[in-house]
Image: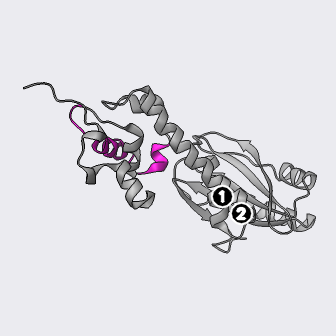
Amino acid sequence: MGEKKNHSIKQWAEDDRPREKLLLKGKNALSDAELIAILLRSGNKEATAVDLSKEILEKAKNNLIELSKFTTNDFLTFKGIGEAKALSIIAALELGRRRRSAEVIEKSSISGSKDVFNYFMAIVEDYKYEGFWVLLLNRANKIIKHIQISDGGVSGTIADPKKIFKLSIENGASGIVLCHNHPSGNIKPSEQDLKLTKKIVEGGQLLDINVLDHLIIGDNNFFSFADENLI
């Protein structure tokens, strides 16, 4: 028998072609694996592009956030994935990350913890260390800008309230939202998190700057101090 050729999308039955499915049924009809298969265009000698995509997703625990952390070398470990295909997937995931942030900026007004999560998730999802940010808002809760206050290590970071309020005043903020990430994925606030939040809230009351929330983000999830009535 001759050697089996690569499983090109062109060779598939029409119902199994993700590109045709996208055209006929729309993007929402496609699974994550089918969308990735469109980027790959072909699989390898043993697997179709969709099968290869499923293999890649399984390695990422079927989680696109985990997949976005893959490096070029991580993708190259899969048979049938070269540098060009790896870079295509990385670029597509990066566009998705930027879109999440852009949607919140376009809306421009923060109405709850979910808006804050969507805004910051695009910033912190690939962040391997613990960092602390502040989101500055005007009186209409519209975003002025975000500023990174500190960049810590794997197990902790330090946020100086004096620096937070100095930047808030300099940028004319009437309200602020605090945010930091837990690279471990555990979003439960520590005793230090609780004490720091209380200290910043009390400082904001003295300066007439409303501390609206404090989010802890980890593993595509978040803890909101405001939602838990801790602010």
Residue shown at the point (35%, 29%) measured from the top left: 77
Residue shown at the point (66%, 64%) measured from the top left: 115
> Which type of secondary structure does the marked residue at label 1 adopt?
helix
Query: Label 2, on which residue?
Result: 107
The label number, if any, that marks residue 103 in the structure image: 1
- Identified by mark 1, the residue type is Glu
Magenta residues, dominant SS class: helix
Residue placed farthest to the left in the image? Answer: 1
**Residue 127, x across and y down, in percent:** 59, 42
The 10 Å Cα crowd at callout 2, few under 14, some 14 to 19, many 20 or more, is: few
**Left or right of residue 36: residue 152:** right
Find out whether residue 190 is within the magenta segment: no
Residue shown at the point (82%, 53%) measured from the top left: 161
70 in relation to 197, above or below: above
**Residue 163, x across and y down, in percent:** 85, 48
Query: Looking at the rendering, which quadrant does residue 104 occupy?
Result: bottom right
Residue shown at the point (25%, 36%) measured from the top left: 7
**Residue 135, x across and y down, in percent:** 76, 56
**Left or right of residue 30: residue 192:** right
> Which type of secondary structure does the marked residue at label 2 adopt?
helix
- Identified by mark 2, the residue type is Lys
Asked whether the residues under the numbered discs 2 and 1 touch, taking CB atoms below 8 Å apart as contact, a structural biologist would say yes
**Left or right of residue 85: residue 219:** right
Residue 69 can be seen, yes or no? yes
The label number, if any, that marks residue 150 in the structure image: none
